[in-house]
Amino acid sequence: MAFSMDIYEYIRSAGLVALLVAAYSVVWFFVPFFQRSKLDRYLKVVNGKHAWALVTGASDGIGKGLADELAHRGFNVVLHGRNDVKLEGVRHKLALKHPKREFRIMVGDAAVLGSGSQPWDVMLASIEGLNLRVIVNNVGGPPPMPMMRRLDQSSMDEITSTVHMNALFPTILNAIMIPRFASSADPALIINVGSVSDSGWPLLTFYGGCKAYINAMSTSMAMEFAVDGINIEVMGVRIGAVATKTELLTPRLFWPSVDTIANAILDRVGCGRPVLVPYWPHLIQTLALDLVPFAVRKPLFAQVFRRLRDEEKKAFPKAQ
C-alpha cells in the first residue's frame, strides 16, 4: 500500500513539474510582446552626427516598411538595393514623408556582390563618415518563379545566387561592420531578417536552409560578442506570410501588412532573444506546427505544397 502511495505521489509530482514547465514555456515565448522596445538607446548623436540605420533590400516590401518606420522613430536611413532608379523613388517618397530625416542610397546586387564587377568597397563608400548604429539585414528571397521546386530541379546558378543573397551577403556585411561598431563605446544593433521556412519546408530546400543559417549566425554572434564584451545587440527575426505586392495578399491577421511587420520587428528590440518570431499571430502558427509530429506533418505538408506547386505552374507557365 505504501509502495502504491509512493508511486501515486511520484506521478502527481511529475505531473505538477510538467505543468510548471509547460506554463513557463508559454510565458517565455510571449514575454517579449509585453516588453517596451529599447530601440531609442541606439538613437544617439555622436560628435554632432545624428544616428543612421542601414536597411538592405529597402526598395520594396518589408525592407521599405522598415526604412519608413525607422525614419518615423527618428533615424536617418541608408536604403540599399540593386536598382538605383527604384531606390531614388523610395528615397524621394520617404524624404517627403519625413522632412526632418536624411536618406542615402547604397546600390549593390546582393546575389553577386563581391565579384570583380561589383566590389564591396564601392558599395560601402556611401556610408563613410556616418554615425551608423543600426544594420537591418533584410535583403533576401526565394529563387525565381516558379519557386516551388525540388532541389535537383534548380540550376546551379539559381542555387548559388539564392545562397549568396540570403546567407553570404549578410554574413560578409556583418563581418565588415563589426570592427566599426566594436571600435565605439556606443551601442549598436544588428537585425537579421529570416523566415519561418527555416524549420524545413518542402520544395524550398536551399532557401529554407539559408534562413536556418541566419538563425544560427544570429545566436553565435550574440554569444561571441558576450565573450569579448562588445556592446552589439543581435536579433534574428523569423517572419511568416506577409501581404506584399509580390505575393498579392490582402492584409489580415495571419497575413499582416509590411508596416505591421516592420513595427513588430522594431518593437522587439532589446527583448534579449537572439532569435524570435516578432509577430504574435505568426508565433502561434509556428508553435502549433511544432507540436505536430513529423510523421503527421510530412504527408500534410506534401499535400499542401503539391497544391501550391501546381498553382504556381499555372500562374507562371512560361517560366518552367
Image (cartoon, rainbow, N blue to C red):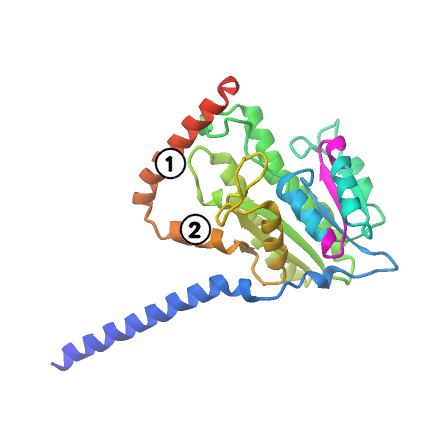
Q: Nearer the viewer, residue 156 or 248?
A: 248
Q: Residue at x 82, y 53 (%)?
A: 100
Q: Nearer the viewer, residue 266 or 134?
A: 266
Tally of marks: 2
Q: Residue at x 41, y 26 (%)?
A: 310
Figure quadrant of residue 24: bottom left
Q: Is residue 250 magenta?
A: no
Which residue is at the far left? Answer: 1
Q: Is residue 181 left or right of residue 11?
A: right
Q: Is residue 103 visible?
A: yes
- Residue 7, x across and y down, in percent: 19, 75
Q: Nearer the viewer, residue 168 or 318?
A: 318
Query: What's the amino acid at mark 1?
Result: Val
Query: What's the amino acid at mark 2?
Result: Gln
- Residue 177, x across and y down, in percent: 73, 49
Pick the quarter of the image with the N terminus. Answer: bottom left
Magenta residues (range): 71-87
- Residue 283, x across and y down, in percent: 47, 54
Q: Is residue 120 visible?
A: no
Q: Residue at x 74, y 39 (%)?
A: 90
- Mark 2 or 1, nearer chain start: 2
* Tag 2 secondary structure: helix
Which residue is at the far top? Answer: 318
Q: Residue at x 77, y 63 (%)?
A: 185
Q: Is residue 74 magenta?
A: yes
Badge 2: how crowded within 10 Å, few (<14), some, or many (20+)? Answer: few
Q: Which residue is mark 2?
A: 285
Q: Which residue is mark 1?
A: 304
Above or below for 236 versus 248: below
Badge 1: how crowded within 10 Å, few (<14), some, or many (20+)? Answer: few
